[in-house]
Image: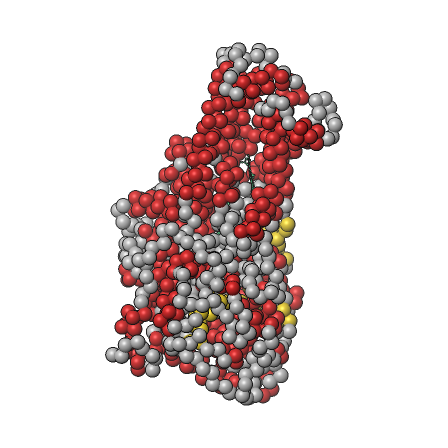
């Protein structure tokens, strides 16, 4: 991990007063630490993207193809024709600045190019120059500038300092969504071979092995077996965790991050416990062992290709519907893109809870249900046998992930589930949760450690809100429904609100479930003593 | 600097008719030709831009959801107008956006304070922009509607009611219009905000100051005509009616004060400038996909016209071919035995 300054130094360096020079004259800082590592040649090549090579953003020469200008220009024109969003957003911003201080990266740095409006202007200035009359005639006076290599470098820095969180778009009077602009800019950069490894490697892994981490099927089985063993040790119950089996009612897909790393694995165990508890007829798949989709952070085409596996696998296995785990951007893809790209999935049926009989008409088209909707429904119908005391002593708050919040509106379902399994729940301040939630600052493929300082800066608004409830209400647990959050929030909390631990919602559910035939529960899923059981530890 | 440029432009725009009419006596040119040309350009390019936007496909359903989604869980309360699920609800969302600036109403300002060496990030309600923007737009709209009395003969009753309402304060002769004061105050606020808030100044371009200054100049010249020059409205109405009926009066009545030609020229400039500028947010807001779409893509199919059916996932068969041996060794089911 890159060295990060301590809090005092970091805060000292924040400055919200813009420089005297106009932004077009301020070059981007290309020193290491300001960018994520570029994509490895072999990953670029595997995905069939242009211009695979070894290069570094710190070098003067980025080894772009000789016709780079043409490629970007043509690519821009093509996308203006394909996306009304891009065309309209390029034309109508009034620069009112309502979005300016809404971006966590601006709040944490004061860098004016992190104001969403200016981030979009980085692209808009080229749009004016290349595609509008005023820009062509008046040039800079009309806010236009020519596309140069320095502009490409600036794009690379700032469009990879946007987590596509859409908080800006909530406040814009015209709904201008800078995330959409960032997505377009990243597509353009890929046309000349400029991308980051932290996105393209998971994407290419996902294509081949079925998950971001490149876990091969037999290894995936080992991991699941290992979790089943742990669950048995903790609860005395051996749960059933079918893999790649045909003919089950439900196919369950969740991000692979939860199969791999702490604390995500506890959430995964929570799912396994829940499914066993209710006797769900389901299977996991190693081929579709990834809920996440780094294609969303790359290009619409790659997103579609990766997402296609879900329906492909559901069809092969003969499942009736798909249940999706806790993940942020996965749910943006499912809610806003999946059926359009890869549907209609007529071979599936409308998700219906086999336990409560609830027909989820709100998933009638995608045939895919969110685990929090599923669990909330079970709880409402009293189908779960719950012992809240296993989570006693916890003071819990909830981090709304950007995508379920602003690209879906899944706000109360997770809260409902949490409140059913813990005694004390408090929300963070209103301006930092629900639709106004702040990003973990590691979304959209920026959860890599070489840009830790950028992440921690961007994490200030979330971290500060967390610190507030920690000081005021003694919050010690930050719940979330996203695998990226489970990876990014721990360092964020350690830095801004030390002492708060991060958990998935279904980890707490798993702990609270009273399993049939279980032994005395003395440990939680992390194998820490349960409240009241501490003295039994040797 | 950008503000200065804009100021210079607007001054130049005042000087043109001042000399053109004052010295060169080109009343016909400024009174008839310029407005007609500006109006035609507006019509053609405004329409062209709307057609251009509307003809672009909306490949994906990407509303920004600003509240709780609709679902079958009836114990969870759907936030209908911030996260609409139906076309009707989306209409209400749009109406709130267009007439009440719903999104801008959410505006907050952020400040970082230090307490005992620790940061406190605070968010404060910041409704000033919303308030003045709303005042500005309503005043602008009302003034525009009030002007229609110059275009219609006889003047319909509604316009008289509107005028009475607008002159409700009953100050001065001629009556002082509320909207005249409001628009000047609001434009001044928007201008001052642009100059005074460092981040907003940093993002502001000529294209941001220019329309505000132009509108201020239009309002000023209008107010001057009404309250100071007390121009010959009857003659002006004659001129305008001549224009709209395509039978321009000739010669242009000499009783019309030069301030009218300045006002008219500035308005013509605004109208001409409109379709090429950010003022097109007027049309764009209706076409913004993050606002005008219901959040229904999980239960109603949304079609992307350029969806490429040739993009297929890496197939299961290829995956199994890749990993069959270890899969069998691990006891995972396979479709084809080795
Ligand atoms: C949903 C509808 C609309 C919203 C939310 C909206 C909002 C805004 C905002 C925030 C500004 C910027 C003020 C500034 O400079 O800081 C503005 C300016 C302006 N708008 Fe609107 N507007 C809307 C519709 C309209 C309509 C229908 C018109 C019709 C003429 C219009 C005409 C103008 C003009 C002339 C300006 C001032 C020039 C400028 O600031 O550049 N707007 N609007
Ligand atoms: S809020 Fe919207 S219109 Fe205002 S500056 Fe930001 S993007 Fe532009
Ligand atoms: S989408 Fe999020 S990260 Fe990107 S500019 Fe907007 S607020 Fe900032």
Left or right: residue A142 versus residue A312 is right
Rendered view: B223 above or below B126: above
At 55% from the left and 74% from the top, the residue drawn is A356
The number of numbered discs placed on residues in the rendered structure image is 0
Colour convention of the picture:
secondary structure
Left or right: residue B214 versus residue A139 is right
Give whichever of B46, B192 is nearer the camera.
B46
Give whichever of B186, B287 is nearer the camera.
B287
Q: Position of residue A455 (x, y in %)?
A: 48, 59
Give whichever of A450, B60 is nearer the camera.
B60
Rendered view: A265 above or below A156: below
Q: Could you say which quadrant of the image residue A317 lies in?
A: bottom left
Q: Position of residue A375 (x, y in %)?
A: 54, 72
Looking at the rendering, in which quadrant would you find the N terminus of chain A?
bottom left
At 35% from the left and 43% from the top, the residue drawn is A77
Rendered view: B283 above or below B71: above
Residue A58 at least partly seen: no
At 60% from the left and 72% from the top, the residue drawn is A380
Q: Position of residue A43 (x, y in %)?
A: 31, 62
Left or right: residue A407 versus residue A301 is right
At 49% from the left and 37% from the top, the residue drawn is B280
Q: Could you say which quadrant of the image residue A51 lies in?
A: bottom left
- Furthest toward the right, the residue is B170
Residue A363 at least partly seen: yes
Looking at the rendering, in which quadrant would you find the C terminus of chain A?
bottom right
Give whichever of A67, A511 is nearer the camera.
A511
Q: Position of residue B149 (x, y in %)?
A: 62, 25
Q: Could you say which quadrant of the image residue A242 lies in?
A: bottom left
């Amino acid at each position: 991990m890159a060295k990060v300054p301590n809090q005092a130094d970091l805060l000292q360096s924040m400055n919200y007063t813009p420089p005297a020079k106009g932004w077009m004259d301020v070059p981007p800082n290309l020193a290491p630490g300001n960018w994520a590592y570029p994509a490895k040649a072999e990953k670029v090549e595997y995905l069939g993207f242009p211009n695979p090579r070894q290069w570094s953003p710190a070098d003067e020469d980025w080894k772009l193809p000789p016709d780079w200008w043409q490629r970007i220009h043509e690519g821009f024109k093509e996308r203006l024709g394909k996306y009304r969003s891009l065309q309209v957003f390029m034309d109508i911003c009034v620069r009112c600045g309502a979005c300016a201080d809404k971006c966590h990266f601006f709040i944490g740095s004061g860098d004016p190019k992190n104001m969403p409006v200016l981030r979009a202007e980085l692209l808009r200035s080229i749009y004016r120059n290349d595609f509008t009359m005023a820009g062509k005639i008046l040039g800079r006076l009309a806010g236009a500038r020519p596309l140069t290599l320095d502009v490409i470098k600036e794009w690379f820095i700032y469009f990879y300092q946007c987590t596509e969180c859409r908080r800006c778009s909530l406040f814009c009077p015209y709904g201008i969504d800078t995330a959409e602009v960032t997505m377009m800019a990243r597509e353009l950069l890929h046309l000349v071979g400029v991308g980051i490894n932290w996105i393209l490697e998971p994407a290419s892994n996902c294509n081949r092995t079925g998950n971001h981490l490149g876990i091969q099927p037999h290894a995936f089985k080992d991991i699941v077996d290992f979790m089943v063993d742990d669950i048995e040790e903790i609860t005395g119950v051996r749960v059933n965790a079918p893999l790649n089996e045909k003919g089950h009612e439900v196919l369950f897909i969740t991000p692979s991050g939860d199969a791999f790393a702490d604390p995500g694995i506890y959430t995964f165990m929570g799912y396994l416990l829940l499914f066993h508890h209710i006797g769900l007829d389901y299977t996991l798949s190693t081929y579709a062992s990834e809920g996440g989709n780094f294609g969303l952070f790359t290009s619409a085409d790659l997103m579609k290709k990766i997402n296609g596996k879900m329906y492909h696998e559901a069809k092969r296995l003969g499942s009736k519907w798909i249940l999706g785990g806790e993940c942020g951007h996965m749910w943006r893809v499912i809610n806003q893109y999946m059926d359009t790209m890869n549907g209609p999935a007529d071979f599936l049926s409308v998700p219906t809870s086999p336990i409560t009989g609830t027909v989820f008409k709100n998933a009638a088209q995608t045939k895919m249900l969110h685990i929090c909707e599923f669990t909330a429904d079970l709880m409402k119908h009293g189908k779960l046998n719950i012992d809240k005391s296993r989570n006693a002593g916890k003071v819990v708050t909830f981090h709304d992930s950007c995508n379920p919040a602003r690209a879906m509106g899944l706000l109360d379902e997770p809260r409902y589930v949490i409140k059913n399994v813990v005694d004390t729940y408090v929300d963070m301040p209103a301006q930092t949760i629900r639709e106004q939630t702040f990003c973990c600052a590691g979304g959209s493929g920026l959860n890599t450690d070489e840009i830790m300082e950028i992440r921690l800066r961007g994490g200030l608004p979330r971290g500060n809100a967390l610190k507030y409830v920690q000081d005021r209400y003694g919050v010690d647990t930050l719940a979330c429904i996203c695998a990226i959050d489970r990876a990014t929030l721990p360092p964020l909390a350690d830095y801004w609100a030390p002492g708060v631990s991060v958990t998935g919602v279904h980890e707490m559910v798993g702990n609270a479930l009273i399993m049939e035939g279980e032994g005395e529960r003395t440990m939680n899923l992390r194998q820490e003593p349960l409240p009241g059981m501490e003295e039994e530890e040797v | 600097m950008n503000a200065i440029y804009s100021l210079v432009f607007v001054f130049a725009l005042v000087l043109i008719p001042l000399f053109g009419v004052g010295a060169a006596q080109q009343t016909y040119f400024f009174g008839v030709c310029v407005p007609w040309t500006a109006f035609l350009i507006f019509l053609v390019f405004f329409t062209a831009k709307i057609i251009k936007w509307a003809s672009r496909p909306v490949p994906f359903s990407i509303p920004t959801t600003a509240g709780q989604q609709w679902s079958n869980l009836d114990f969870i309360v759907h936030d209908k107008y911030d996260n609409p699920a139906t076309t009707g609800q989306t209409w209400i969302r749009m109406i709130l956006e267009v007439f009440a600036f719903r999104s801008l109403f959410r505006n907050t300002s952020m400040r970082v304070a230090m307490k005992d060496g620790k940061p406190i990030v605070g968010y404060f309600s910041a409704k000033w922009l919303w308030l003045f923007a709303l005042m500005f737009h309503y005043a602008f709209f009302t003034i525009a509607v009030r002007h229609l009395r110059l275009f219609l003969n006889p003047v319909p009753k509604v316009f008289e009611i509107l005028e009475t309402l607008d002159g409700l304060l009953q100050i001065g002769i001629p009556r002082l219009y509320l909207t005249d004061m409001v628009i000047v105050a609001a434009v001044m606020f928007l201008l001052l905000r642009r100059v005074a808030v460092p981040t907003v100044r940093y993002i502001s371009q000529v294209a941001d100051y220019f329309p505000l200054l132009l509108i201020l100049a239009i309002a000023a010249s209008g107010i001057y005509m009404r309250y100071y020059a007390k121009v010959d409205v009857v003659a002006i109405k004659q001129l305008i009616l001549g224009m709209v009926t395509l039978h321009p009066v000739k010669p242009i009545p000499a009783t019309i004060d030069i301030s009218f030609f300045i006002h008219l020229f500035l308005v013509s400039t605004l109208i001409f400038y409109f379709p090429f500028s950010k003022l097109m947010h007027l049309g764009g807001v209706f076409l913004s996909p993050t606002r005008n779409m219901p959040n229904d893509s999980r239960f109603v199919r949304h079609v992307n016209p350029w969806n490429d059916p040739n993009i297929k996932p890496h197939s299961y068969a290829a995956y199994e071919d890749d990993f069959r041996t270890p899969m069998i060794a691990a006891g995972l089911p396979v479709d084809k035995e080795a």
